[in-house]
Image (cartoon, rainbow, N blue to C red):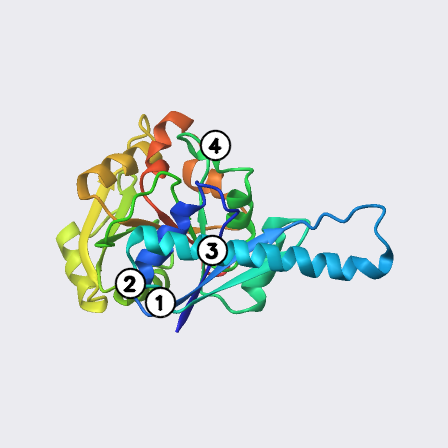
């Protein structure tokens, strides 16, 4: 059974990631682990012998708060809770706590909400952006304005590097959700030598989960984010999948030369970011 680590700080924005994870759990066999990191407040006047008791009391308080938060969210969604548990960790650095716990406990995904008001620049430099850049565990990034809906289609935005290895991961993810996957590639003039229909037939034979193939010529004036935004509006995927290089920042790899205004799609479409094979 797959495990998803779902982070929350009890904010309204963090509910988006939780809702998306709960929706995923209605479509695939998965265990959700709701995770909260807190920084203990220890009065300077407290006796050393009482510090441990104070930590335990604060941990119990946050644990109860998390369990109530999760229960209330399930009720608001009218969803019967599936297999899940709540974990509270005391740590000075929330993103480090998430990474350490996810890596030590063999999670298949980390699910986090974005915060901010409309551009990728609102993600970079935040806990979500830092976890994206450092995590070897695939990260689900859910827009803070996300509204619950059934997951119907996965869009894999590909550079066609390591296509077989990457497509097998995407196909496995889509199959677990019992949905199909589309593949989109933005090519430079002269890059594509085979016809779109030929490639589609070839890849559909290898990957039954593949539905549609979109080969779009790259527009230097528009940039990748704006073109992907238009494609998302056209085909309306439930989630967009990327593979990220660790030697480049997540921002530079996918959105490097574009303006913040052109990447508004990140406030609308949840994303799944895998680490690039071999990076």
Q: CA distance from mark 1 to mark 3?
A: 15 Å
Question: Element type at marker 1?
Answer: loop
Rounded to the nearest angstrom, the CA distance separating label 4 from label 3 is 33 Å
Residue identified by numbered label 2 = 26
Mark 4: few, some, or many residues within 10 Å (few <14, many ≥20)?
some
Q: Tell which of 10 and 185 is nearer to you.
A: 10
Q: Nearer the viewer, mark 4 or mark 3?
A: 3
Write the residue at 38% across / 25% down: 261
On the rendered structure, is 38 left or right of 118? Answer: right
Kindly identify which numbered label has been placed on residue 82.
Answer: 1
> In what element is the residue under mark 3?
helix
Q: Which residue is mark 3?
A: 68
Nearest to N terminus: mark 2 or mark 4? 2
Q: Mark 2 packing: few (<14 Cα in 10 Å), some, or many (20+)?
A: some
Nearest-to-viewer mark from 3 and 2: 3
Q: Nearer the viewer, mark 2 or mark 1?
A: 1
**Mark identifier at residue 58:** none
What is the tally of numbered marks visible in this picture? 4
Q: Nearer the viewer, mark 4 or mark 1?
A: 1
Residue at 13% in and 53% down: 197
State if disc 1 and disc 2 touch (CB < 8 Å).
Answer: yes
Question: Marks 4 and 1, Cα distance to the nearest angstrom?
Answer: 35 Å
Name the spot of residue 259 as percent of width and height, x first. Answer: 41, 26
Q: Upstream in the sequence, badge 3 or badge 2?
A: 2
* Of marks 1 and 3, the one in the foreground: 3
Is 24 drawn above or below residue 148 in the view shown? Answer: below
First in residue order: circle 4 vs circle 1: 1
Q: Residue 121 has which mark?
A: 4
The 10 Å Cα crowd at callout 3, few under 14, some 14 to 19, many 20 or more, is: few
3D distance between C-alphas at marks 3 and 2: 20 Å
Mark closest to the chain's N terminus, 1 or 3: 3
């Amino acid at each position: 059974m797959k495990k998803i680590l779902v982070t929350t700080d009890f904010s309204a924005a963090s509910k988006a990631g939780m809702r998306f994870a709960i929706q995923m759990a209605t479509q695939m066999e998965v265990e959700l682990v709701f995770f909260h990191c807190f920084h203990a407040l220890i009065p300077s006047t407290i006796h050393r012998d009482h510090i441990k008791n104070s930590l335990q009391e604060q941990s119990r308080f946050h644990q109860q708060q998390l369990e109530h938060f999760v229960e209330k969210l399930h009720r608001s969604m009218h969803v019967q809770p599936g297999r899940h548990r709540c974990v509270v960790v005391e740590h000075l650095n929330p993103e480090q706590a998430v990474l350490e716990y996810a890596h030590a406990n063999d999670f298949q995904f980390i699910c986090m909400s974005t915060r901010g008001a409309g551009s990728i620049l609102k993600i970079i430099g935040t806990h979500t952006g830092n976890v994206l850049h450092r995590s070897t565990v695939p990260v689900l990034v859910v827009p803070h304005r996300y509204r619950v809906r059934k997951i119907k289609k996965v869009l894999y935005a590909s550079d066609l590097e390591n296509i077989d290895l990457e497509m097998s991961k995407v196909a496995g993810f889509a199959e677990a959700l019992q949905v199909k996957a589309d593949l989109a590639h933005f090519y430079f003039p002269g890059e594509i030598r085979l016809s779109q229909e030929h490639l589609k037939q070839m890849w559909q034979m290898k990957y039954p989960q593949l539905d549609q193939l979109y080969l779009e010529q790259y527009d230097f004036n528009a940039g990748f984010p704006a073109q992907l935004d238009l494609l998302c509006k056209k085909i309306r995927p439930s989630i967009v999948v990327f593979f990220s290089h660790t030697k480049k920042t997540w921002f530079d790899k996918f959105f490097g030369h574009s303006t913040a205004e052109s990447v508004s799609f990140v406030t609308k479409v949840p994303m799944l970011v895998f680490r690039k094979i071999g990076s």
